[in-house]
Image (cartoon, coloured by chain):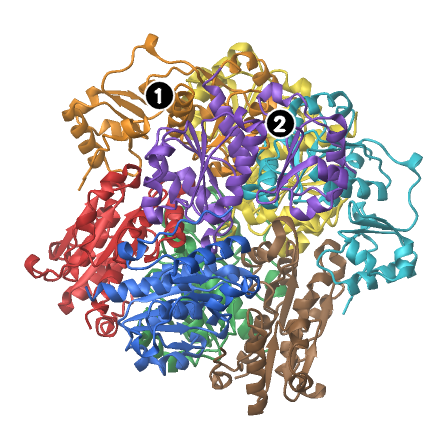
Chain colours: A yellow, B brown, C green, D blue, E red, F purple, G orange, H cyan
Amino acid sequence: MTEFRHDQDRAARTGIPEAVLCEHKSAAQVRAIGAAVLKAGQRMLFTRLTAEMFAALPTGLREALDYDPDSNTAFLGAACADQAMIAGIGIVAAGTSDLPVAREAARTLAFHGYAAPLTADVGVTGLWRLTEQLTALRQHRVIIAVAGMEGALFTVLAGLVEAPVIAVASSVGYGVAAGGRVALSVALASCAPGVVAVNIDNGFGAATAAIKILRSGKR
Amino acid sequence: MTEFRHDQDRAARTGIPEAVLCEHKSAAQVRAIGAAVLKAGQRMLFTRLTAEMFAALPTGLREALDYDPDSNTAFLGAACADQAMIAGIGIVAAGTSDLPVAREAARTLAFHGYAAPLTADVGVTGLWRLTEQLTALRQHRVIIAVAGMEGALFTVLAGLVEAPVIAVASSVGYGVAAGGRVALSVALASCAPGVVAVNIDNGFGAATAAIKILRSGKR
Amino acid sequence: MTEFRHDQDRAARTGIPEAVLCEHKSAAQVRAIGAAVLKAGQRMLFTRLTAEMFAALPTGLREALDYDPDSNTAFLGAACADQAMIAGIGIVAAGTSDLPVAREAARTLAFHGYAAPLTADVGVTGLWRLTEQLTALRQHRVIIAVAGMEGALFTVLAGLVEAPVIAVASSVGYGVAAGGRVALSVALASCAPGVVAVNIDNGFGAATAAIKILRSGKR
Amino acid sequence: MTEFRHDQDRAARTGIPEAVLCEHKSAAQVRAIGAAVLKAGQRMLFTRLTAEMFAALPTGLREALDYDPDSNTAFLGAACADQAMIAGIGIVAAGTSDLPVAREAARTLAFHGYAAPLTADVGVTGLWRLTEQLTALRQHRVIIAVAGMEGALFTVLAGLVEAPVIAVASSVGYGVAAGGRVALSVALASCAPGVVAVNIDNGFGAATAAIKILRSGKR
Amino acid sequence: MTEFRHDQDRAARTGIPEAVLCEHKSAAQVRAIGAAVLKAGQRMLFTRLTAEMFAALPTGLREALDYDPDSNTAFLGAACADQAMIAGIGIVAAGTSDLPVAREAARTLAFHGYAAPLTADVGVTGLWRLTEQLTALRQHRVIIAVAGMEGALFTVLAGLVEAPVIAVASSVGYGVAAGGRVALSVALASCAPGVVAVNIDNGFGAATAAIKILRSGKR
Amino acid sequence: MTEFRHDQDRAARTGIPEAVLCEHKSAAQVRAIGAAVLKAGQRMLFTRLTAEMFAALPTGLREALDYDPDSNTAFLGAACADQAMIAGIGIVAAGTSDLPVAREAARTLAFHGYAAPLTADVGVTGLWRLTEQLTALRQHRVIIAVAGMEGALFTVLAGLVEAPVIAVASSVGYGVAAGGRVALSVALASCAPGVVAVNIDNGFGAATAAIKILRSGKR
Amino acid sequence: MTEFRHDQDRAARTGIPEAVLCEHKSAAQVRAIGAAVLKAGQRMLFTRLTAEMFAALPTGLREALDYDPDSNTAFLGAACADQAMIAGIGIVAAGTSDLPVAREAARTLAFHGYAAPLTADVGVTGLWRLTEQLTALRQHRVIIAVAGMEGALFTVLAGLVEAPVIAVASSVGYGVAAGGRVALSVALASCAPGVVAVNIDNGFGAATAAIKILRSGKR
Amino acid sequence: MTEFRHDQDRAARTGIPEAVLCEHKSAAQVRAIGAAVLKAGQRMLFTRLTAEMFAALPTGLREALDYDPDSNTAFLGAACADQAMIAGIGIVAAGTSDLPVAREAARTLAFHGYAAPLTADVGVTGLWRLTEQLTALRQHRVIIAVAGMEGALFTVLAGLVEAPVIAVASSVGYGVAAGGRVALSVALASCAPGVVAVNIDNGFGAATAAIKILRSGKR
């Protein structure tokens, strides 16, 4: 039932190759796509690949994958050597609960050859946790910020740095904050210039946007 | 068509006398209530009394009222002498657009005999505007904070002071922030302990809650 | 993957020490935080710690915790002696289904050294259940009220007492009331002055706000 | 452009004749319907007929109408003599702002030959205002209750009387209560048995339901 | 942790005795309430009692209960003899998926001594299924109608009968209709007079309202 | 500020030429587009052109337009002779308030050369109004149905005819039905096969879809 | 508890026979309906029949059914021979995750005797995937398009073909796109004429509408 | 009542000087801010300054302002010479109704010294309008795209270019698309990597983000 037509031209056209979002796909579909890519000898990034789905893949495919359970991502194909990684992007996570999304961003960046240090636990309830990192954060040319609950981090951070801030609301929260809608709205309504938003939990989208932004200055 | 039955016992029962919310009332209803209160020689606070509605009141009633067009409030009855005002409550407004709501709170407090200094324009995009006021803000025993748009002020402020923070979302904003829902949700979802919320634009409610809180420590 | 940076200064700054919300954290993250706190010999409150997650903790940590399955809270560190507990706060729950949230508030208060009697089953459909408790309820200096479904308790209660009422909507209900939004809106829209709201199911937030309120009168 | 086909059989079929909701109709449409009904010598109830639209009707039609600006209703055709009016239905309004909706219900009842005393200003913030009316209210066989804001009246009232309560949320409120949704949800989520709801501001619907209910016991 | 205070006076006050909504209660809470009622020798209706929760009750209580898995209801105490059941109420269900809610209504009626024939599968897509039942349906003095999806049944039915129609939206549907909101809104927005609504899936509420309505004509 | 680039190829590509939606355009923009089309000697349909905006157009353009204030549409260019109009599409409107939307559909059809009889006032509260038209309605090969409030017409109609039904929710209603969302949801959730929906108030879209449908059988 | 009344006349009345939506029905209800249809020797389409529910059916019924786990559909009764299938309808799916909905449409068409080629993986991020299929797609007289996430396919496709496009939003997506609401809104708000929508995930409804449309041109 | 505290340090801290959002401010507040800035001899950008509010400013201030009624923006202070403007940013608007938002972006860029060509009327219903501009669009290093209704432009464009796309939903649309929510959701849910979003109608925010992005590559 899978009829996957790889958009191989996408990297040339947009700078970012196609990736496979495994959520909402059946295990059979992921398996079929993986087999096709493996056979064609291509590189591919898989996101939202749960441990259960990974375990259900055939041994050959599983062994070919560099799988990271903390971010539910997998790489097919040769990794970039660490020393060859491009710098310039930083990732900031408000709380420990936001780490899986932050790590999806970090892994997406790594797959494309970008190194991005992750600064965790800088929620603005304890403002010092953010301000003591400020000198380091100001070195980045683009910052990906991940926050759930009320997302106040986005505004405070963007008011303190020159780099554009890509805000990723995480679906962390309960009551009115359940599902990440409040944090997303906060990012969009932020009074601080330079905050742009991607979809809730979309670490992949934040990473690819960061790459495009970094490259936009280089052409 | 007006059948107003004054809850005269309310002050004794709850500590706060009944007030008249003029919004959603017809001019005739407000006039009738005003006349009844004036005749009975009672004191009364009117809120959401627009300049248009005020202008439509009979001269006698209008002259008896201490009307403030910036907050759309009016006092009927003797005001408290400034030097007799009780201290302990502070008001903070994120932006100039939030001032009408902040002033509704200030006027409600004044009507009940409480003085409350108003600190304006402390939005967290320019964090220094808040932190340079911190010593003064830490003197308050209760703080009313008014903010629209993304309301990040609530969390940052509550992470810096000991006083409980009564958050009033103002209906200032556009797009996803239109109507104040985002700022309200932010107040409710705040990670900072000690933030409590009242309805959007409810400066009156914040003020009466502040009075009750201040008194709760005095009994 | 856990990078927990304890905001140890928070108690000094805001009067309330940092606590750990276990919801949305992985078992590994909670375990790592617990181990760090245990090793540092600090006290810590854990909330939303389910029985399943508690059971998955290492024996040493589990034995060090005072765990309460009815409220999903755990204390690490020495408890306050009952006779040393500070009075002044009361808790009211509309129905038996609201008890877990009410108990999260009670446990949070206990961890910080405050005793708070819990009055249960006072839903206003049977008004006598509330009014027969009125003399007792009027003794409290702050009242935490927990209600789901249509939350009419908040308004009726606040119209009868002098103390400020911290309303906690519980996510108890079905149909239009599912998830607690209606009860929360009722608290915010209440005509009764002195009602303030925290997030749905946020017994912890209500308790810490109550402590701040009680203290605000004491400085 | 008007093609009005009168459902003349409706009274026989359902017990309630068709009425004309003027809202969302153009002045030309209302005029055409009025002319047709007048010419046919029929009786007709017009609801949501604003003063502006009424003023724009031709003199002959205007003079034939018994128009009430407080409820925006008009009667075409002979009124029922007061002494012939049928008793059994009572109307309760929480606040003065709820009176227009309450009066739409009262006028609809009057058009159909039912007398309904209106008890105003019984919001539950001052519970005594409701309880002092209780003996009278318990005489009614059906009660129409109108409330905006948080609508706590519905539950408290239904917990105190035997009659079924038809709850009409009024669109009175601001912030989270704007538009009447909260009061409506409260009516639907009420823990008190015997509360049924009609649409927001639907005084007409409440009245016709009350008539059907009263008759249902008489057949 | 259960502190159940039975509102024993409720039947005298409102005509309907208190019932126990088991949803959102823990098994321990239901068990405790059941034991207390059993010990006191009282009658009690339990609703939303799932088969799982029922199976977890102690044998003694389970044997004392008349449990119906199709409606998740249980009776404690002597049933009314069939021949003594009071007539006048009819129940209509649009589709087979709506039967559990319809049956919750039927069981609630039975517990209180009312017999109510259930007419199923009368969705208006096949209008003849409704119209062929019309003579029978017109005999009822009150009709409870249950429908999910788009709920068109409510309007069509109410346009054909004299009896008041209590509309119960069922949470049957998917996509835009998921959760029953559309069917509920349709009931509230219905152009047909005499439709009143209760909460989604609230067969219990519809039944108790029907009883109150039937009685209202009898006093 | 207008930079209008006419998609002249659209008729060839999709069968329907581009039209101009005047809503959200400034008077200057509409004027500029009109002048360009007039100068190029092309035909053009303008929708949502209010009487105010029409009056503000220059005399030359105004005289060149065939303007219909009941539907806020205008034709530029030669009309189709009535006897040349293509039959097969019927329009049904539930109430008189739905006529402007129905007429936008009728005018759009006329501009493209299709005649469509309009059957008005067939709301299902008086079912006979629909059923007495059934023989005529069954002649149509496509039916456009317009309804606001609760939109029950869509389901009932689609259950009685063979033709596909294009449902247009009109923004007629108040309370929960305000803005047309309920009627739209009803169309989408309808149990009757063959109901398809377009946007609220989108008479234009319904008409163009009807044309495409009619043609789809002809190729 | 099942009282299924088959609307056997529906095919004659509307052209489409009744089908059984298994979602929200209990296994017992589906079993009873299946047995009745089997006994009556009729044909019947079952939709949303999960593998779990299918496995729970009695062997006899299970063997009589042509079950397809990819679409959760089952046929009871003789299938149409492939060579007798009617052409004219095409199905397009944006991504592999949309295939189950697309296949529900394909199977519904097959049950009624229509063959419909399925073109998969034509999401507009790689526009060439759509345009390279354009010649083939332009042969269809009706197109069913299935897309989740942001549903941009609907507009782009409808701007390129003459056939009417029936848009089916699939509930594929996360964050703001969760549940299919965004894709549905996009279909409804599309600027391209000729897009009509059915409920989210409603492959069945799209297929039956397509049949009605195809037939409408044939009468 | 105005207490404006200029965040003069903001340009140094974040690269973008503070601007004045006039919406939700009173005329008196805007006048006071303008006077202060004028007196201090500073430069300042005013956004959402309606023609009415501009006309109400004192003559001196009005003459000092470079006001543009198409975008409701005004510059105070010396403009940048056209030949000194920095290139690299492009603006794309889907329809003529989106031009005011696009122009707010263009003016904001101009105030900060950036030239940005505006490509209008490239809605994807006529795909050729976009593709014929593709060579030019591919020259930009950052693209701001403005679209209302269903916003399909964002995805199609981002799938064709290398530059990051800042999507600005405009509040252009009706029915389900009213207010811009659908277009915003489409931007966030877009399958195309490299799309980031700002608030609805936020041309200012898109422009300042574009500047930050362009600069990020230059440091």
Q: Is residue G199 above or below residue H53?
A: above
Residue G162 x %, y %: 54, 20
Please identify the quarter of the rendering in which residue C133 is found. bottom left
Q: In terms of depth relative to the viewer, which is nearer, G187 or E41? A: G187
Left or right of B4? Residue E79 is: left
* Pick the front one: B93 or H25: H25
Chain letter for the residue marked with disc 2 in the picture: H
> In the image, are marks 2 and 1 on the same chain?
no
Q: Residues within 10 Å of mark 2 (few under 14, many from 20)?
A: many
Residue flagged by tag 2: what amino acid is it?
Answer: Thr
Horizontally, residue F14 falls left or right of residue E179, namely right
Q: Residue B169 sits in which quadrant? A: bottom right
One can see residue F180 in this view: yes
Residue lying at the far top of the rendered structure: G83
| Residue that mark 1 sits on | G107
Residue C115 visible? The answer is no
Q: Position of residue D46 (x, y in %)?
A: 44, 62
Count of numbered labels shown in the rendering = 2
Name the mark nearer the viewer: 2 or 1. 2
Q: Secondary structure at mark 1?
A: helix
- Residue drawn at 76 percent across, 41 percent down: F59
Of residues B57 and F103, the one nearer the viewer is F103
Q: Which residue is mark 2?
A: H125
Query: Marks 2 and 1, Cα distance to the nearest angstrom?
Result: 30 Å
Secondary structure of the residue carrying numbered label 2: helix
| Residues at discs 2 and 1 in contact (Cβ within 8 Å) | no
Nearer-the-camera pick, B48 or B83: B48
Compared to residue D216, the image places residue A142 above or below, namely above
Q: Position of residue E83 (x, y in %)?
A: 6, 58
Q: Position of residue D94 (x, y in %)?
A: 44, 73
- Kind of residue sitting beneath label 1: Arg
